[in-house]
Image (spheres, rainbow, N blue to C red):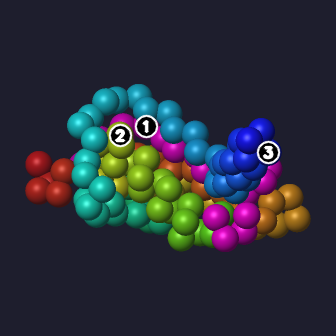
Amino acid sequence: MKLHHCLILAAALLFAGCTPKIVPQISKSATPLPSSTEITVIELNAPQPENAEVLGTVRIGDNGFTSAKAGSYDNVISLAKEEARRAGGNAIKITSHESPDSQSSVHRIKATILKVNKNGK
């Protein structure tokens, strides 16, 4: 029975160790959005909309055991979008992006979580 518990614990640690490290810093609370809400991604060199309210930031990077698949650009962006929804934001503005290199096999980003008034008001 102890072996069974040890295997479950090892599997849980392995699974948790494979995911990127997520560090949100929320400075303004808003109502969380449903998982079906589309989140706009504003790329690194694009300007931030003038009618955007900053809700916080999120940093996603390597936790030391992150797999290359879990740390793909698409997955990292998906994780940032999830954090934006939790914070009530409908957009993220990428402020920093580090591609995989000799130090890490994953993409690392920093993004500002925004609530953009789509009506322009």
Q: Secondary structure at mark 1?
A: strand
- The image quadrant of residue 55 is top left
Is residue 103 toward the left or the right of residue 15 in the image? right
Q: Between tags 3 and 1, which lies in front?
A: 3
| Amino acid tagged 2 | Ala
x 50%, y 62%: residue: 77
Q: Which is in the foreground here, disc 3 or disc 2?
A: 3
Residue displayed at 67% across by 70% down: 69
Residue pointed to by mark 3:
3
Q: Which mark is residue 24?
A: none
Name the residue located 35 percent from the left edge and 40 percent from the top edge. 87
Q: Is residue 109 above or below residue 32?
A: below
Neighbours of disc 2 within 10 Å: few (<14), some (14-19), many (20+): many
Mark 1, other Cα within 10 Å: few <14 / some 14–19 / many ≥20: many
Left or right for 7, reference 55: right
Return the mark for residue 56. Answer: 1
Q: Mark 2 and mark 1: span between their CA atoms?
A: 8 Å
